[in-house]
C-alpha cells in the first residue's frame, strides 16, 4: 500500500489544487480501497488523512470522510508530536465541519509552533522595510527600546548595502530580502528579539452583537442577482474598535508582500472576534453562505510610501469573498477602493496562476484593460467599515491610494474572509501564467 501511496501522493494533491475534481476523486477512492496494514507508520497516517480530507472536500464537505481524516491527524500527532502541516490540515478539516472554535484553537497552536519551531531557517526568514517599520512602531508603543531595530532599517534602505537576493524590481522597491544578507551583528539583533503575545482572547465580555442591523433579505437578493454587493457600516462600533485595537498591537503581521504585511491564521490572526463575526454573517445570510463554510481569513496592512499600490489584479480560490475596510476615513487622502470584474479564471487553474504578483506592471495593465473591455466592472470607493461581498474568484484589484500614516492606526487596513470552494462558472478569461523561473509571489 505504502509504495503506491508514496508514488501517487503528490500527483493527487496537484490534481486537487488544479481543481480536477472527477480525476482526483477517482484516484483517491482507488487508493483508499487498498488494504490497510495493521501497523501504520506516521507517513501512512498523514497520507491517509490527506486523502480523506480531499475526498470529503470534493464530495461537498462529506462529514464521514472529514471525521475519519481528523482521527488520522490525531493519531499522527501521537506518533510524531505537533507538526506544522498536520495542524494546518486539521484546522482546515475542522472549518469544513463547521467546528470553528476548535479550528481557531488549532491555528493558534500552529502559530505558536511556527514561533517555537519555525518551518524556515532563521537565516532564510524574509524581512522588508514594511516589516521593520511595523515592528519598530509596535514595540515602541509597548515601551521597548527599538534603537537596534532602527539600525537594521537604515541599513537595508541604503542602496550600497541592500542585497536584492530575489532579483526582482518589486523586492528592490520594497527592500525585501532575507536575514542572511545582513551583517552578523544585525542578524543577532533579530535573533534576540523578544516574542510577544498574540492577544487573541478578549479581556472583556464578548459583545452581544457583532454586526449592525441591515435589510439582510435585500442584501441576499442583490448578491444573487449581481454577485457583488456593498454593505455599509457592517460592524458595530464596539466590534470595529476591537478589531482596530487588535490589529494595532498584534504581532501576527508576519507575511511579507509587495509593500504590505499580511496576518493569516498560521501567523496567529485568530482573534475570537473574527470567529464570532464569521458565524454571525452565516446566520444572517443563509441563502448566500449555506454550503460554504469559512475557509480562510486575513488582514492586510499597507505601509505609507511603500505599499500605496495596494494589491494587484488577482482572484481568490473560494466561493464567497467579503472584504471590509477598517481604517478611519479621516486617515485617507485619496483612493483605496476596489475594482471587481465579471470574469473568473479557468476552472482547472492552479492558485498561483491567478493569485500572484505580475512580473511587470505593463503585463498587469494590459490584462486589466482587457477585463474592462470584455465585461462589467464594479468600482467601489473606500469607506471605513464598508464591506464588499462578491463572488470570490472574480478578478479584482485595489485602487491605488494615499493614507496619512502618521501613526499605525492610520495605515490602510483591510480584513478579508473567504467562504467555500470555487463554484462552476460559464464566463472565463484565462490569465497567462508566470514564466517557470519567475513565478511571482503567491498572495497567500
Image (spheres, rainbow, N blue to C red):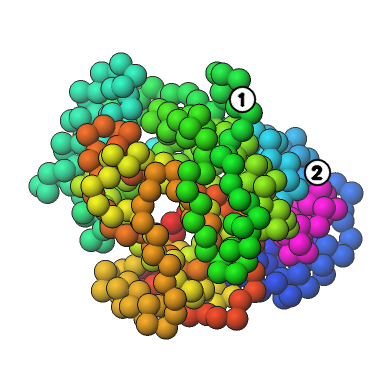
Which corner quadrant holds the N terminus?
bottom right
Classify residue 354 as left or right of residue 139. right
Between tags 2 and 1, which lies in front? 1
Residue 437: percent from the left, percent from the top? Answer: 37, 69
| Image vertical order of residue 41 relative to residue 168, above or below | above
Identify the residue at the far left of this view: 160
Residue for point 39% across, 64% down: 379
Give the percent coordinates (x, y) of residue 82.
65, 35
Q: Give the structural element (helix, strand or loop) at label 1.
A: loop
Q: Secondary structure at mark 2?
A: helix
Residue 262 in the image, given as x and y percentages of width and height: 42, 45
Q: Quadrant of residue 12?
A: bottom right
> Mark 1 = which residue?
206
Q: Where residue 4 is drawn, which disc sits there?
A: none
Q: Which comes before the other along the chain, label 2 or label 1?
A: 2
Q: Quadrant of residue 261?
A: top left
Instruction: Please state which of residues 426 and 102 is positioned toward the viewer in this rendering.
Output: 426
Q: Residue at x 59, y 42 (%)?
A: 213
Q: Is residue 156 left or right of residue 317?
A: left
**Marking on residue 71:** 2
Mark 2 closeness class: few <14, some 14–19, many ≥20 residues within 10 Å: few
Q: Main secondary structure of the magenta part?
A: helix
The magenta region covers 49-69
Amino acid at each position: 500500500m505504502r509504495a503506491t501511496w508514496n508514488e501517487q501522493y503528490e500527483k493527487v494533491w496537484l490534481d486537487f489544487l488544479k481543481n480536477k475534481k472527477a480525476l482526483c476523486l477517482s484516484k483517491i477512492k482507488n487508493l483508499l480501497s487498498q488494504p490497510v496494514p495493521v501497523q501504520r507508520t506516521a507517513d501512512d497516517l498523514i497520507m491517509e488523512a490527506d486523502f480523506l480530507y480531499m475526498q470529503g472536500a470534493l464530495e461537498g464537505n462529506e462529514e464521514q470522510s472529514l471525521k475519519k481524516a481528523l482521527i488520522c491527524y490525531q493519531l499522527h500527532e501521537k506518533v510524531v508530536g505537533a507538526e506544522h502541516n498536520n495542524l494546518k490540515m486539521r484546522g482546515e478539516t475542522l472549518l469544513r465541519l463547521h467546528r470553528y472554535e476548535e479550528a481557531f484553537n488549532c491555528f493558534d497552536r500552529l502559530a505558536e509552533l511556527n514561533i517555537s519551531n519555525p518551518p524556515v531557517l532563521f537565516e532564510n526568514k524574509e524581512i522588508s522595510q514594511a516589516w521593520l517599520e511595523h515592528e519598530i512602531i509596535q514595540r515602541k508603543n509597548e515601551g521597548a527600546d527599538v534603537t537596534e531595530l532602527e539600525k537594521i532599517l537604515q541599513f537595508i534602505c541604503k542602496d550600497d548595502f541592500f542585497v536584492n537576493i530575489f532579483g526582482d524590481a518589486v523586492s528592490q522597491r520594497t527592500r525585501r530580502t532575507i536575514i542572511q544578507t545582513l551583517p552578523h551583528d544585525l542578524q543577532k539583533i533579530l535573533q534576540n528579539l523578544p516574542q510577544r503575545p498574540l492577544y487573541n482572547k478578549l479581556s472583556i465580555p464578548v459583545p452581544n452583537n457583532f454586526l449592525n442591523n441591515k435589510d439582510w433579505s435585500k442584501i441576499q437578493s442583490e448578491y444573487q442577482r449581481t454577485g457583488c454587493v456593498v454593505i455599509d457600516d457592517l460592524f458595530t462600533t464596539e466590534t470595529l474598535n476591537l478589531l482596530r485595537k487588535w490589529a494595532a498591537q498584534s504581532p501576527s503581521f508576519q507575511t511579507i508582500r509587495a509593500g504590505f504585511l499580511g496576518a493569516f491564521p498560521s501567523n496567529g490572526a485568530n482573534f475570537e472576534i473574527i470567529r464570532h463575526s464569521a458565524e454571525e454573517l452565516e446566520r444572517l445570510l443563509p441563502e448566500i453562505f449555506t454550503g460554504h463554510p469559512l475557509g480562510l481569513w486575513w488582514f492586510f496592512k499597507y505601509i505609507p510610501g511603500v505599499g500605496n499600490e495596494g494589491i494587484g489584479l488577482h482572484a481568490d480560490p473560494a466561493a464567497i469573498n467579503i472584504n471590509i475596510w477598517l481604517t478611519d476615513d479621516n486617515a485617507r487622502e485619496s483612493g483605496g477602493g476596489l475594482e471587481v470584474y465579471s470574469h473568473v479564471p479557468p476552472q482547472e487553474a492552479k492558485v498561483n496562476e491567478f493569485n500572484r504578483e505580475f512580473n511587470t506592471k505593463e503585463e498587469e495593465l494590459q490584462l486589466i484593460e482587457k477585463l474592462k473591455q470584455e465585461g462589467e466592472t464594479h468600482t467601489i470607493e473606500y469607506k471605513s467599515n464598508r464591506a464588499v461581498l462578491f463572488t470570490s474568484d472574480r478578478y479584482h484589484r485595489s485602487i491605488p491610494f494615499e493614507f496619512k500614516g502618521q501613526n499605525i492606526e492610520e495605515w490602510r487596513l483591510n480584513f478579508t474572509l473567504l467562504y467555500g470552494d470555487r463554484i462552476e462558472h460559464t464566463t472565463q478569461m484565462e490569465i497567462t501564467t508566470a514564466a517557470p523561473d519567475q513565478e511571482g509571489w503567491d498572495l497567500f
